Image (tube, rainbow, N blue to C red):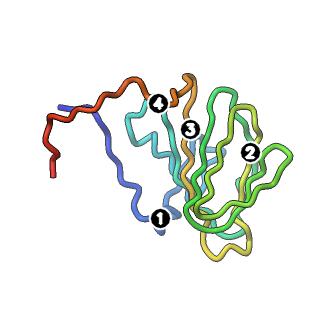
Amino acid sequence: MSKYSITNIGPMDTWRNHFGGFVEATNKQGRRVIDHELETEIIGFTATAYEPGEEAGYWHSHSELEEVYVFLEGHGQMGLDDELVEVRAGTVVHVPTGVMRTWRCRPDSPTQLRWLCIRAGNQPLEAIPSDASPIRDIPMPW
């Protein structure tokens, strides 16, 4: 049997129902650490939903991990070192190691701010993956 793992995070309008985080001190309503539910080894990610006006309440940076934030709905802001960046559905923000970050859902956002944060590190990715080869002689499963 193949080794893979699956979880279901549900539709975005249910993300707010989840309470979680990495450690008890930073657990929040609307935060889900999805990689804790899967068998990932070098990729991690969270799904988050903030109400209008809600904010992280802290800054942080990583010394080994970079993060990519993919905003799916709502209007928000990210603090990135000494800059303030507007984010909304379709915004993708890459934050490298060493950059301080925080975020909030703008008080005037028409909906919750919903996003995925993808974390990875330790090994640089190749521009073109060298560990994959197409297998063309196996029929498609559909």
Tag 2–tag 4 contact (CB < 8 Å): no
Say left or right for 38 vs 58. Answer: left
Q: Which residue is mark 4?
A: 128
Name the kind of residue labelled 2 in the image.
Arg
- Marks 2 and 4 sit apart, C-alpha to C-alpha, by 29 Å
Between 139 and 45, which is closer to the camera in this rendering? 139
Q: Position of residue 58 (x, y in %)?
A: 76, 48
Image quarter where the N terminus lies is top left
Mark 4 or mark 1: name the one nearer the start of the chain: 1
Q: Which residue is mark 1?
A: 12
Say which element carries label 1.
helix
Among the two numbered marks 2 and 4 on one chain, the one whose residue lies closer to the N terminus: 2
Q: Residue at x 57, y 56 (%)?
A: 115
Tell me the CA gap for discs 2 and 3: 14 Å
The mark found on residue 101 in the picture is 2
Q: Are dots 3 and 4 in contact, CB under 8 Å?
A: no
Q: Amino acid at mark 1?
A: Met
Name which of mark 3 and mark 4 comes first in the sequence.
3
Residue 76 x, y percent position in the rendering? 70, 63
